[in-house]
Image: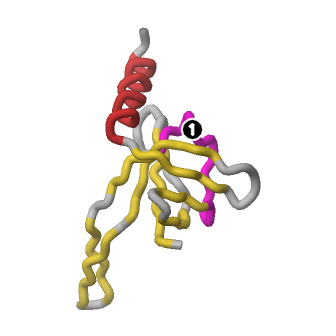
Amino acid sequence: MTFATLASEALDITFDEFGVDALYSPQEGTAVNIRVIAIRPDEIVGFGETQIHAETALYEVRASELSQPRPDDLLTIDGADYVIQGEPERRDPHRLVWALDTRPA
């Protein structure tokens, strides 16, 4: 068994345990049921000498569930809609997870 296979299996267990159900609706195409993990770090945004504390809505989804999420696609979680803003990124070394930066719809 390769390291990548082990990483993928560990990731599946993590999403099964800590993920929540979501609906991914692309601008074009069919909506897909997925599992996401919420990563909501607080962010300090600076405007000149002023700093504003802002909540972020960042979600991770397995690349095996979404091949190419796009900006302006919609993510629905517990009845709340979020729009993907910016380009989704795959930050992990094995490129198994998309990071989706969102804002309320």
Picture quadrant where residue 53 is located: bottom left
For the point 52% across and 65% down, the residue is 81
Three-letter code for the amino acid on which mark 1 is drawn: Glu
In this picture the colour scheme is secondary structure
Residue 63 lies in the magenta stretch:
yes
| Residue identified by numbered label 1 | 65
Residue 75 lies in the magenta stretch:
no
Left or right? Give the position of 83 relative to 41: right
Picture quadrant where residue 72 is located: bottom right
Measured from the top left, where is residue 73 in percent x and y?
Answer: 62, 61
Q: Main secondary structure of the magenta part?
A: loop
Quarter holding the N terminus is top left
Secondary structure of the residue carrying tag 1 is loop
Residue that lies at the very extreme toward the bottom in this rendered image? 49
Residue that lies at the very extreme toward the front in this rendered image? 79
Measured from the top left, where is residue 32 in percent x and y?
Answer: 63, 46
What is the magenta range? 61-73
For the point 39% across and 31% down, the residue is 11
Q: How many numbered tags mark residues here? A: 1
> Which residue is nearer to you in this view: 105 or 5?
105
